[in-house]
Amino acid sequence: MTLCPPIRRTPDQRPHSPPPGGRARRFRIAGADVSASIAVFLIALPLSLGIALATGAPLQAGLVAAAVGGIVAGRLGGSPLQVSGPAAGLTVVSAELIQRYGWRTTCAITVLAGLAQLGLATLRVARSALAISPAIVHGMLAGIGVTIALAQLHIVLGGTPQSSAVDNVLGLPAQLADVHPAALVISALTVGLLLLWPRLPGRTGRLLRKIPAALAAVAAATAAAALAGLAVPRVDLPSWSSHALPGLPEGPVLGIAAGVLTITLVTSVQSLLSAVAVDKLVATRADRGHGIPRSRLDRELAGQGAANVVSGALGGLPVAGVAVRSVANVSAGAMSRNSTMLHGLWIVLAALFLVPVLDLIPLPALAALVMVVGIQMVSITHIRSVTRHREVLVYAGTLSGVVLVGILEGVALGIAVATAVAMHRLTKTRITREERDGGHLVCVRGQLTFLAVPRLSRALHQLPQGARVVVELDGSFMDHAAYEALHDWQASHLRHGGAVEMTGPSGARIAESDAAPHACCRPWTPWRNHCGEHHHPHHHPVDETRATTGHQLASGIGKFQRNTAPLVRDELARLAREGQRPSQLFLTCADSRLVTSMITSSGPGDLFTVRNVGNLVPLPGEESGDDSVAAAIEYAVEVLRVQSITVCGHSGCGAMQALLSSAPDAPQTPLRRWLRHGRPSLERMASRRHTWARISGRLPADAVEQLCLTNVVQQLEHLRAYESVARRLAEGTLTLHGMYFHVGEAQAYLLAEPDEQHRYEDVFDQVAPSTPTPTPTPTPASASATTDGRIAPTMIGDRTEARAS
């Protein structure tokens, strides 16, 4: 049997490009995107007007920013479902700039901030923004929220806000003494509806809750003011012909530079954090975000920069990613960036054709809406989070700085407090001694740095020679000075006949290093056979190879007997008595990088594992003298009665590379005779009758990855040809699964579920990480040398010593 001819491609067709289709691609908008865009539009319209009112900018500036944020940032940004527009977090910054420099200069500052964001995106520093402590970000947003709420409270009461939060607090008693009843009634109605609307009971309430609370509150307040004839100030949108555009910046250079820096900082950090939050929210949807790519933060930063350039040039407010609108977009079922762009289009149409309706909205209603948004920015959830992580001081310092001084100053104060707290934690080490069970217990609480070495040495050298000592280390960091001090004392104490045991906070024993050459190994290096690289440089390569290959297995077994065996002995004894009862047959490649127990979090007895070159399942009768795979399938299905069979391929598979590069007239070696079972996968990839396999919504990177994915699907088809498998499938007592493991990304992908014809879609979906849960045993149990699910050579070789100990 000869190899199939190579796949022919046109010169401009890349190896992983899809086969040419018979129909031209059309531009389509999903119905879910249309409905989501309308929901977001109904929320964004009143909020944009309210934020513009709070900043003192022309009201049209809020509509311009909302439209530009939807269309420009939605089209160019890297987060498909994030909605951008005028953000409440920018209200204080914009209000201060408008008051100090005027509206036209503020627009110019917005343009310059957008250009700065484009520059930062070019430098690819978006990930660096996420290094800012969440306590600082939450404190900044809370401080902005307090400032907004204090300012809007004056408008709610019928007055005019002052220039700073302190002045607003000082002026509050006088404002309370001069309340305007009409404004207060409209504001109270708006706030009441905002709070009660999401809690409307019954079937009618469920239908009404589909209308956004912000729209319902503002609409009800507008109707009440019009019907009652209340004398309250209303929205006054001037003609677009008189709309103010930016001018050349006028003012001190340092002041304008500070304004540019502030807008750049706030818009960038808020947008990037919001994009990360949107990714997490998408992953929790019922559809798991199928087909929606994760956010590309540098592109998102560039999209926000372009939006700010356009918004400032058109006379709009600064633009940032907005959490409230983004959450509404995701919750409404949006599937692509089309929903964000459509919401911007609806804003444009409303600004052009709904001006008479918008002019009826009372300003106190918008002020009440923004005030509630400001209060909600002081999130109880965030406060609980920073309290749990002991960062209340950082949160409070940032909040106070933003309220009392300003955004940049508050953030700088938060960074200073966070640094001081980190230094305090680094230097705070508590060392105690006590006698217990005829020995001595030394407890070290906190991080061990050179600053704690004198106290550590004094406590250790006060212990009597020859005593049995347990040193309990409850910290995540130990610098070189502390390590040397502890190691030297341990060696001295052992020389004088003492006994020393190092434990962690839970009492688990910390294994000692065997030899100096291995002291450099990090906790994960027992998985790697690279410790030999650290031998003396003058060692002969042959001697080094002998040392690594000749003694490494024995050393690993010794570590297993010393560290791992005591932890798993009871479980293995139970399995020896009861026999193996694996839940699934796991068929995968013999590649040494594929550690089945690690990627499946399985323990002894869980998997009946079959490994071969290329994770191949020969068709029945095709093995020609070697029935090992067929025998394993029959034994697992008929005797062990497994409930599922998983075929797992992986990236960079050498067998698939050999299949692609094999020549038809090549000599038949044992490897080539075995790889003939993979030719149906090669033919399936070349066939136009089958769809091309995709991985998490994208096409494979190259022909090798395409063949790796296609091979998994083809081997599942081969499994169905086995009589025992077909019978169990018909009974409904067996399921088949396809899996692909990307080695470089440490990411697993599962093949899409089968349809009613029991055929799979050739789509591999990413498996999202979940919260870790304790496992019954701390050791893996995949069998790479035998199919018995109870035996794990990787466990016996102790490549998992760090996990076991």
Image (tube, rainbow, N blue to C red):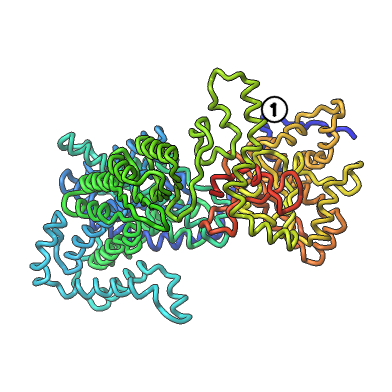
Pick the front one: 187 or 491: 491
Q: Secondary structure at mark 1?
A: loop
Looking at the rendered image, the quarter that the N terminus falls into is: top right
> Which residue is depicted at the point 91% across and 41% down?
624
Return the residue at label 1. Answer: 11
Give left or right: position of 388 versus 725.
Answer: left
> Which residue is depicted at the point 76% across and 39% down?
613
Residue 615, position as x, y percentages in the image:
75, 43
Give left or right: position of 529 versus 736.
Answer: left
Q: Identify the amino acid type marked 1.
A: Pro
Residue 44, position as x, y percentages in the image:
37, 59
Pick the front one: 65 or 803: 803
Give left or right: position of 494 versus 117.
Answer: right
* Residue 379, quarter of the rendered image: bottom left
Residue 69 appears in the figure = no
Residue 571, position as x, y percentages in the image:
65, 59
- Image height of 704 relative to 630, above or below: above
Residue 549 appears in the figure = yes
Question: Crowding at label 1, few (<14), some or many (≥20) Cα neighbours within 10 Å?
Answer: few
> Which residue is depicted at the point 82% across and 31% down?
5
